[in-house]
Amino acid sequence: MLLLPEFEYYEPTDMDTAYSLLDQLKSDGKIIAGGTDVLVNLKEGKIHPGCLISIARISGLSAIEKKGTEVVIGSQTLAAAIAESELIRVEFPILSHAASKLGSPLIRNRATIGGNIVTARPAADLIPPLMALGATIELRSKGGTRTLHLEEFLVGPGQTTINPNEILTKIVIPEAKPFSGGDYMKLGHRKSLEIAIIAVASVLTLDETGKTIKDAKVILSAVAPKAIHAVSAENELIGAEPTPELFEAAAVRAMSDCSPISDIRGGSEYRKEMVKVLTGKTLLNALDAARGGK
């Protein structure tokens, strides 16, 4: 049985205290939200902070709000709250669906959207739909605020561009474009409690006639060091008529956009083949959603 190493624990109730602790502790301090990833990484020796700083008691970090044309989600918002939010379900059903697939009900009631992002796991469930939706994140420190597109924030497995004195405070999703729809699918050995072998998030935007794809986002997960755009697949789709033949061609393109590894959960060639399958399926479902089919 793996035991947690010794560490100091702080639970500030306001952001200023949290910033001061980060400045004081430097690289020895680690922010903890729900703890579903941090505690596992501690047990496995992947991280070695001397201090954990919980932001669970800081108010204002767990709201889901419509602000103008954007939806703002606090970094402390639980996956369960995202899955159950009527606002998210109406505005961004792809994100609601992905949140409902994150672990078990117990995990969804502990895991936060901020933790899912900052941990930067290549197979994180919320990152692909957020990238497909064009989400940005807000990083705050005592010195100011930075806003980044999500893909700019992610570097590799467990690696991001966050500075030691910064806290992820909110995720901002722009208003969905008219005639848009999306879908998220992941493949695992089991139906639940499974880290994705591969996952795909697709979002399509049609013109007013529904006969041309104005914009396309295809995000691949668990097939590279971080979630990535299937750029050649997106280029294949934009400006074209949405047909099953087009989606099949784009799905083949998506295979060449990734470089999955082989591990105990699946071989690289199997993963590439499943990228093709899931890309084709999510594009068909995204088209159906964009046309108002669901």
Image (cartoon, grey):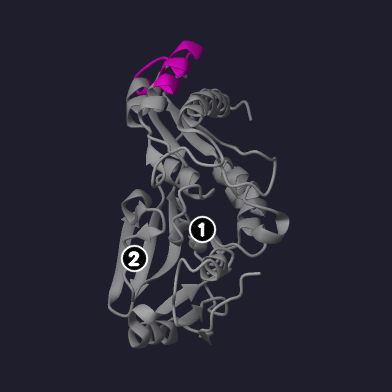
**Residue 224 placed where, x, y %?**
40, 41
Q: Which amino acid, mark 1? A: Asn
Q: Which secondary structure, mark 1?
A: helix
Task: Look at the image and give the residue range highlighted in magenta.
Answer: 237-252
Bin the neighbour count of mark 2 within 10 Å (Cα to Cα): few under 14, some 14-19, many 20 and up: some
Residue 291, position as x, y percentages in the image = 55, 24
Q: Which mark is residue 116?
A: 1
Where does the image place residue 65, in percent across and percent down from the top left? 53, 60
Judging depth in this view, the residue of 291 and 68 nearest the camera is: 291
Residue shown at the point (52%, 68%) measured from the top left = 38
Badge 2 element: loop
Picture layout, residue 181 above or below residue 158: above
**Residue 158 found in image quarter:** bottom left
On residue 162, the disc is 2
Q: Which amino acid does label 2 sit on?
A: Ile
- What residue is rendered at 71% in x and 60% in y? 106
Q: Position of residue 208 (x, y in %)?
A: 44, 23
* Image quarter of the N terminus: bottom right
Q: Is 247 colored magenta in this rendering?
A: yes
The Cα–Cα distance between marks 2 and 1, rounded to whole angstroms, is 14 Å
Q: State the predominant SS element of the stretch in magenta.
A: helix
What residue is shown at x 61% (from left), y 57% (from top)?
79
| Within-10-Å neighbours for mark 1: few <14, some 14–19, many 20+ | many
